[in-house]
Amino acid sequence: MQHVYSRVRRCIDDYGMIAPGDKIAVGVSGGKDSLLLLVALAGLRSFYPHEFTLHAICLDLGFPGVVATPLVDFCERLDVPFSLIKTDIAPVVFDIRKEPNPCSLCAKLRRGALHEAALERGCRKVALGHHADDAVETFWLSLLFEGRLSCFQPVTWLDRKDITLIRPLLYFWENEIISMKSGLPVIHNPCPAEGHTQRQAAKDKLKELEVTIPGARQKILGAMQRFPLMGWGIDKDGNE
């Protein structure tokens, strides 16, 4: 875990993600990424130079048969308050709206519910479990489907809500997180669209690209920082 703490701390410091007294809501889906993020931030509390507090928030999307009990127990062991927010997002997206491309609406509704829950608990920052592969895939999708050089930013301020989003796992690749998921109470994603999205197609194409150009994803991420893409630039002293 020292390796995890070190790299998460470097990402936080490079982009100025945490300030003294921050109350941070951690979006916990039950997937490996958000759970590792929660573990890392919970551990950092004891030695990070800026004092901060955490509150884990999980959205119950309304899929049948999903049990959050393992997450409750996990957060108790980490000494992190936990809230389960019940929503009707899945029925709205799949049963009422019958969206042919459900990801966009689902993401919009999830963001709204998470941000409202964070604000209700006094949290002005929300930590998300996006990793390096997520960033490269988003850049790739924007380039190929929208003709734009664009990606989410490591730190994003939402002026309408006065909430700041932070992504402390951006210095980890997905295969690294997979290798560390043992012991985490990962909950299976019940979404019927899982594995059948444009993002999955981008993920598959990037894997194919790695076969002929080893390290292609690392090179893309490095280019995003050196360009720099908006919000991604850091100088040699770690300042944005």
Image: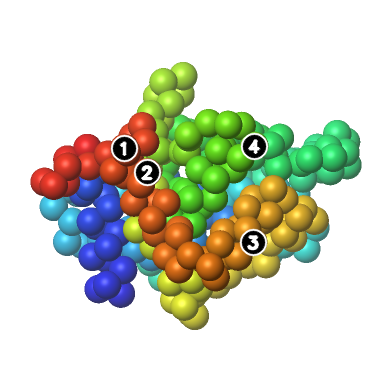
Figure label count: 4
Q: Where does label 2 land, which residue? A: 224
Q: Are marks 3 and 4 in contact (CB under 8 Å)?
A: no
Please, which residue is most extreme toward the top here? Answer: 160
Q: Secondary structure at mark 3?
A: helix
Identify the mark at residue 9; answer none if there is no mark: none
- For image coordinates 48% across by 71% down, the residue present is 175
What amino acid type should be assigned to the residue bearing mark 1? Pro
Q: Secondary structure at mark 4?
A: helix
First in sequence: mark 3 or mark 4? 4
Q: Where does label 1 land, which residue? A: 228
Give x and y (percent) for residue 56: 46, 52
What amino acid type should be assigned to the residue bearing mark 2? Met
Does 3 sit above or below residue 95?
A: below
Q: Residues within 10 Å of mark 4 (few under 14, many from 20)?
A: few
Quadrant of the image for the N terminus? bottom left
First in sequence: mark 3 or mark 2? 3
Please, which residue is most extreme toward the front here? Answer: 212
Q: Where does label 4 land, which residue? A: 145
Q: Are marks 2 and 1 in contact (CB under 8 Å)?
A: yes
- For image coordinates 32% across by 38% down, the residue present is 227
- For image coordinates 21% across by 49% down, the residue present is 13
| Foreground pick, 208 / 136 | 208
